[in-house]
Image (tube, rainbow, N blue to C red):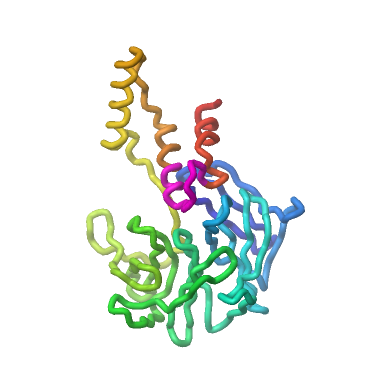
């Protein structure tokens, strides 16, 4: 389940909000390796988070130092800082990138860091393996040629919007207030489209509203099971009646929401396991909501 990462510019505290849908389930200050609260400010800035497929941990927090141009990943377990590592290039050497390049988004499904060059308008993706770059590429248009987009367009987020398993890029036009999604296949655009409202018409939103990020958000508008979920319930109850004359199972909306959240979490976890991220272990969620 996606959480919200906050930073206080006055105190330099970093805080994580662990979310249950739109409700905060808990929140905590990020702690250093020694267990004490850690306070980091300028010239360091947070630019998002990327996952590490090799670890059963929460996403790494991405920091960048505007003085030294170092990019650093903080490996997290819940709100505890496990380790911090300087981002390394493909050869294993530390890499330092600064202006006119700027981090504009982070990717979680295919862990990566999205950069944009304000001078050339090139967009580049660093595909990450932990703190090491395993590959990088200039974003290509549908025809395979490099694409260069600048102001009034800006990248405002990244996420898997069509369930393809690839991280897509969100753009916003400050002049027309159009929001556009580039559906990606690695570093190549396979399609793009203007964001549409509920009625299917293009939607244009500008100041004082601004996009600050994208992530996995669920909204249980329907407390009834889907057809597939209902089919499983029916088949289970038929078997319970046939074998032992047991009473039918009753649907609990809280457990249904927990199961859906756990399924979404596992869908983004490349490890072959029934355990998701540490903050969303199924039995823990069930116990909390059921009062066990």
Q: Residue furthest top?
A: 245
> Which of 101 and 17 lies nearest the eye of the viewer?
101
Q: Is residue 273 magenta?
A: yes
Q: Position of residue 198 (x, y in %)?
A: 27, 54
Report if residue 179 is visible in the image: no
Q: Position of residue 182 (x, y in %)?
A: 34, 69
Residue at the spot 39% in from the left edge and 69% down from the top edge: 186
Question: Considering the image in quadrants, where does the C terminus appear?
Answer: top right
What is the number of callouts on the image?
Answer: 0
Q: Is residue 40 left or right of residue 108?
A: right
Q: Residue furthest left?
A: 200
Q: Is residue 235 magenta?
A: no
Q: Residue furthest bottom?
A: 119
Residue at the spot 57% in from the left edge and 54% down from the top edge: 55
* Residue 65 drawn above or below residue 284: below
* Residue 93 drawn above or below residue 129: below
Report if residue 62 is visible in the image: yes
Q: Is residue 36 left or right of residue 186?
A: right
Residue at the spot 62% in from the left edge and 50% down from the top edge: 77
Range shown magenta: 262-276
> Which of 54 and 259 lies nearest the eye of the viewer?
54
* Residue 228 drawn above or below residue 115: above
Magenta segment, principal secondary structure? loop
Q: Position of residue 110 (x, y in %)?
A: 45, 62
Instruction: Determine the image quadrant of residue 144.
Output: bottom left
Q: Position of residue 178 (x, y in %)?
A: 32, 69
Q: Is residue 107 left or right of residue 170?
A: right
Instruction: Determine the image quadrant of residue 141.
Output: bottom left
């Amino acid at each position: 389940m996606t959480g919200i990462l906050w930073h206080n510019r006055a105190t330099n505290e970093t805080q994580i909000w662990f979310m249950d849908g739109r409700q905060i389930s808990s929140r905590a200050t990020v702690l250093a390796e020694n267990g004490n609260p850690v306070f980091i400010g300028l010239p360091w800035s947070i630019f998002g988070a990327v996952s590490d497929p090799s670890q059963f941990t929460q996403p790494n927090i991405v920091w960048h130092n505007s003085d030294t141009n170092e990019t650093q990943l903080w490996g997290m377990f819940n709100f505890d800082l496990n380790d911090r590592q300087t981002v390394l290039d493909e050869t294993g050497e530390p890499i330092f990138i600064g202006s006119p390049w700027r981090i504009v988004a982070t990717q979680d499904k295919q862990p990566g860091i999205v950069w944009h060059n304000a001078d050339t308008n090139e967009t580049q993706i660093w595909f990450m393996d932990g703190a090491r770059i395993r590959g990088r590429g200039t974003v290509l248009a549908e025809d395979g040629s490099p694409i260069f987009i600048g102001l009034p367009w800006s990248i405002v987020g990244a996420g898997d919007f069509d369930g393809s398993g690839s991280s897509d890029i969100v753009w916003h036009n400050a002049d027309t207030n159009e929001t556009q999604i580039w559906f990606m296949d690695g570093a190549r655009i396979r399609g793009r489209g203007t964001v549409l409202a509920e009625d299917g018409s293009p939607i244009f939103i500008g100041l004082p509203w601004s996009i600050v990020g994208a992530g996995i958000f669920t909204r249980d508008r329907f407390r009834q099971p889907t057809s597939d979920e209902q089919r499983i319930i029916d088949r289970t109850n038929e078997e319970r009646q046939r074998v032992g004359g047991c009473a039918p199972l009753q649907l609990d909306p809280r457990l249904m929401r927990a199961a859906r959240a756990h399924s979404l979490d596992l869908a983004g976890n490349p490890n072959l396991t029934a355990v998701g991220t540490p903050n969303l272990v199924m039995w823990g969620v069930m116990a909390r909501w059921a009062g066990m």
